[in-house]
Image (cartoon, rainbow, N blue to C red):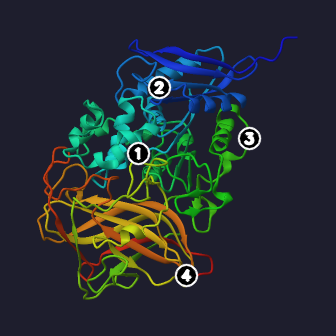
């Protein structure tokens, strides 16, 4: 009797796209013979890297054929690469190729995070008859507002790292040297950063900067308005401290409301944990420990999903609520049916001060009491001295720049006190909480402000202040003044004129415990995560001239600046 057939690797197999381009895929088959359920992951990061092959090997050991493919123009695939184009049709053609292979049983799922998730969202609306289920993670619904222009502010660090990654074969470990410890981010104009970085122009970097409003260029890249063309069940996961939780909730809600079939509307699933962009490797992130209960083996979660949809294994997943959310602070998982939660009490917490809310040493207060006749708060924002990015909603495990020394910046719930000492950071804090207070849902700051400049930024952070005074960021947001009316066009502001701004923070789920305090930080920069607003109204791509802006924040009965918190009532407790 012949020995059992081993797991087989077939590296650099060629798939013919509809235009004749040869796309490279690596195929890993389980032990034994016959036909298998198959998973497809397409990405621009080298399909036969150690990380991808280890993941493929895990699936093969568990009875799945796994196909890992290079996007067009990357590594062994022919053609010219351009982010997201034509990932949809190439994905469709790869599915058709798999379905014809003797080792495939015709049930195919797609899987992968980040760019690989984007590939799936581009492929799904094309209606391949061979696509049975998806697991598309950590990606945004709208590339303009989720990835490159959050609140209209250009996401400098993430965009530049993406441009470099897609143009070169540099490993992430090389980024620190290439980015020159962060000094490169200060270069102006931004449009030339590609040449400064690697000595050549990067076409998509320039396209991103040359399309500073949501136009047809962005619309063609997005999943928006494609829900009615998607008829497969989708499993999604993200982290509260990733750059994409807002977009993931919109994707989930879009499918749930507008999916093509009852199946696609009934079975979008979303898992939100206390993580950043990367899969968790421990129960700790930033300065917080979330307990052993927080750690999930995410590949096992994916296996349950595909076991049900591709292998007809009744494991109960179809009967579970569609949302699984981790409540930080309480450090427990919650199963929910809708977003926002039906029991949410959207509660305004108003800003107060005697006109000196600057820094931790100021007199800024936060309470549910409406303001009366109060003095305004003032600070000066100098683009030459921006507030540095520390923790928060970042999308890599560690960034290739430093704040003060050699320590890399990490994402997540990180203590903000080092920047709360600055005079250009306004700090509004509640009294100590007498009861636990759960905040789960979308968060908005309504800010009344004026500036001496024709354009500027305003930032906001939601902070959990611990009894030992640690000031832990839980969510953040930004608005660029010229985008206050939306993203279809820009309009500069009149200097020294009061405007109302809506700053959308990332959603969160956190139990602010008894004895803690809730805090909101307001400023005008978060650099280098976001490009500095030069305060001159010049174009984001070509502007070079900088000026300081004198900022005024209003919180009186006519201009009640506040944050709206999604309070979830605690059982037998009054708010």
Q: Residue at x 39, y 34 (%)?
A: 165
From mark 1 to mark 4, how far is it between C-alphas?
Answer: 38 Å
Q: Which residue is mark 1?
A: 141
Disc 1, SS: loop
Report the Cα–Cα distance between label 3 and label 1: 31 Å
Q: Which mark is residue 314?
A: 3
Given residues 311 and 369, the one toward you in this image is: 369
Q: Is residue 494 above or below residue 517?
A: above
Which residue lies at the image location 69% right of the left edge and 19% below the top edge?
Answer: 35
Depth check, front residue: 19 or 285: 285
Q: Which residue is mark 4?
A: 515
Q: Earlier in the sequence, mark 4 or mark 3?
A: 3
> Whole-Å distance between the Cαs marked 4 and 3?
46 Å
Mark 2 vs mark 3: in front: 2
Residue 99 percent coordinates (x, y): 58, 19
Which of the two labelled residues, at mark 2 and mark 3, occupies the earlier sequence position? 2
Name the residue carrying label 2: 91
**In the structure shown, which secondary structural element does the residue marked by tag 2 occupy?**
helix
């Amino acid at each position: 009797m012949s020995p059992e057939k081993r797991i087989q690797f077939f590296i650099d197999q060629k798939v013919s796209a509809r235009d004749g381009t040869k796309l490279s895929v690596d195929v890993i088959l389980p032990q034994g013979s016959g036909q298998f359920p198959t998973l497809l992951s397409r990405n621009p990061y080298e399909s036969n890297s150690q990380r991808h092959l280890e993941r493929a090997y895990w699936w093969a050991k568990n009875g799945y054929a796994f196909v890992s493919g290079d996007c067009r123009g990357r590594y062994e695939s022919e053609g010219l690469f351009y982010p997201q184009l034509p990932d949809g049709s190439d994905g469709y053609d790869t599915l058709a190729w798999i379905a014809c292979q003797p080792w495939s049983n015709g049930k195919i799922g797609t899987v992968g995070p980040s760019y690989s998730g984007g590939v799936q969202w581009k492929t799904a609306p094309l209606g391949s008859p061979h696509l049975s289920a998806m697991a598309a993670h950590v990606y945004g619904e709208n590339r303009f507002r989720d990835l490159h222009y959050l609140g209209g502010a250009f996401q400098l660090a993430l965009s530049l790292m993406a441009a470099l990654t897609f143009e070169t074969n540099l490993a992430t470990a090389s980024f620190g040297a290439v980015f020159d410890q962060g000094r490169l981010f200060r270069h102006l104009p931004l449009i030339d950063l590609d040449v400064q970085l690697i000595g050549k122009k990067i076409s998509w970097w320039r396209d991103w900067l040359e399309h500073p409003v949501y136009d047809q260029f962005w619309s063609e890249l997005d999943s928006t308005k494609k829900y009615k063309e998607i008829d497969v069940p989708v499993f999604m996961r993200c982290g509260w401290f990733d750059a994409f939780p807002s977009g993931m909730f919109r994707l989930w809600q879009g499918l749930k409301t507008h999916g093509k079939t009852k199946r696609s509307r009934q079975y979008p699933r979303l898992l939100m944990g206390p993580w950043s962009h990367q899969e968790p490797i421990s129960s700790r992130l930033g300065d917080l420990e979330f307990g052993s209960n927080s750690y999930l083996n995410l590949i096992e979660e994916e296996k349950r999903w595909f076991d049900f949809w591709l292998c007809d294994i009744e494991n109960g997943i179809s009967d579970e609520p569609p949302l699984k959310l981790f409540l930080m602070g309480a450090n427990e998982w919650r199963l929910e049916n809708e977003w926002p939660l039906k029991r949410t009490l959207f509660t305004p917490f108003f800003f107060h001060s005697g006109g000196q809310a600057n820094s931790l040493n100021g007199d800024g207060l936060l309470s549910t009491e409406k303001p009366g006749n109060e003095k305004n708060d003032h600070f000066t924002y100098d683009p030459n001295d921006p507030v540095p990015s520390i923790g928060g909603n970042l999308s890599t495990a560690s960034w290739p720049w430093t704040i003060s020394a050699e320590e890399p910046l990490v994402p997540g719930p990180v203590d903000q006190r080092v920047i709360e000492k600055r005079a250009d950071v306004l700090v509004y804090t509640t009294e100590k909480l007498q009861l636990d207070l759960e905040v789960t849902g979308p968060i908005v700051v309504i800010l009344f402000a004026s500036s001496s400049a024709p354009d500027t930024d305003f930032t906001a952070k939601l902070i959990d202040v611990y009894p030992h005074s640690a000031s832990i960021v839980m969510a953040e947001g930004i608005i660029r003044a010229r985008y206050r009316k939306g993203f279809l066009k820009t309009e500069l502001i009149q200097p020294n004129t009061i405007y109302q701004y809506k700053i959308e923070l990332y959603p969160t789920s956190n139990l602010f415990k008894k004895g803690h305090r809730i805090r909101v930080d307001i400023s005008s920069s978060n650099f280098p995560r976001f490009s500095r607003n030069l305060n001159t109204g010049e174009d984001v791509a070509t502007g070079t001239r900088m000026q300081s802006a004198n900022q005024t924040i209003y919180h009186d009965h006519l201009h009640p600046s506040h944050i709206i918190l999604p309070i979830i009532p605690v059982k037998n407790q009054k708010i």
